[in-house]
Amino acid sequence: MIKKFIYLTKPGIIFGNFISVMGGFFLASQGNIDLWLLLVTLLGTSLVVASGCVVNNIIDQDIDVKMERTRNRALVKKSVSNTAAFIYAAVLGVFGFALLYFFTNLLAVAFAAFGFFVYVVLYSLYLKRHSIHQTLVGSLSGACPPVIGYCAVANQFDVGALILFILFCIWQMPHSFAIAIFRLNDYVSARIPVLPAKKGIYITKLQSAVYVLLFMLTGSLLYVFHYVGLIYLIIFAGLCAYWLYLAVSGFKAIDDRVWARRFFLFSVILITVFSIVISIDYQLQPSYGFIFKL
């Protein structure tokens, strides 16, 4: 039974966000690490994300039952009740927001609340079922964790935080498109209006390649504004070059599902390495314009 409740939180998503929070946190810390602040920021953000994922499971039951990869989830199988799941989500959310509120700052809390609202209300309740733009709006939620980590340290929303936010929004587009292609039959069965189902796989691949280019350009801004060093730029450029190669090779792919899986897996590797590198190759820099504080 414990395992069923753990899986309701979507551990894979939590782990990915855990890494991105660390990246933002270490980038803002510039080598001066507050271990207690890091711990509460990671735990608080993870609990908020977990809460949102449980609520998403509750909302998506009618969709999950139609999809091969989700039809055995605990709520679909009724091995966990809706009431128990709601209570579980509420406890996770309350503890998560409490940790961020009492031990970080209001800016970090605000981004956690924004991400939760976008994912649960805008994405899960409406856009996932009704709009082809679901991925774009949902990316706003996925871009919040690294900004939470950054703002927990800096207590301001500056150019560095803005670049991280835009960068993670862009990254999620080709990442999600790859999932949509790989699981296209599931999405069609559940009548979810993902891009490849509505506009075709070719258009999806084309947009993926464009987003990879935008990701490369945006990530380079961290070097331009002196947040990271040359080591970061070299590694980042190499990763993006290979991701772009994969994107372009998709136009000649014999099996779209095989290509999409490969493209997706590398996107995970890329963002993980990115988060690690910005944690290590940081630069001591002044704050640049566009500062917002709470």
Image (tube, rainbow, N blue to C red):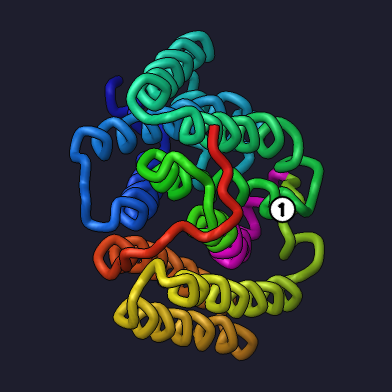
In the rendered image, which residue does mark 1 sit on? 188
Residue 178's spot in the image, x, y percent? 57, 66
Q: For residue 170: magenta? A: yes
The answer to whether residue 109 shows anywhere in this view is yes
Residue 279's spot in the image, x, y percent? 29, 61
Residue 94's spot in the image, x, y percent? 43, 16
Residue at x-position 33% and y-position 76%: 229
Q: Which residue type does callout 1 highlight?
A: Val
Which element type, helix, strand or loop, lies under badge 1?
helix
Residue at x-position 51% and y-position 88%: 245
Q: State left or right for residue 87 relative to residue 1.
A: right
Give the residues in magenta. Answer: 168-190
Q: Which of 286 and 275 lies nearest the eye of the viewer?
A: 286
Picture quarter with the N terminus: top left
Residue at x-position 80% and y-position 47%: 131
Picture quarter with the C terminus: top right
Density class for disc 1 (Cα within 10 Å; few <14, some 14-19, many ≥20) is some
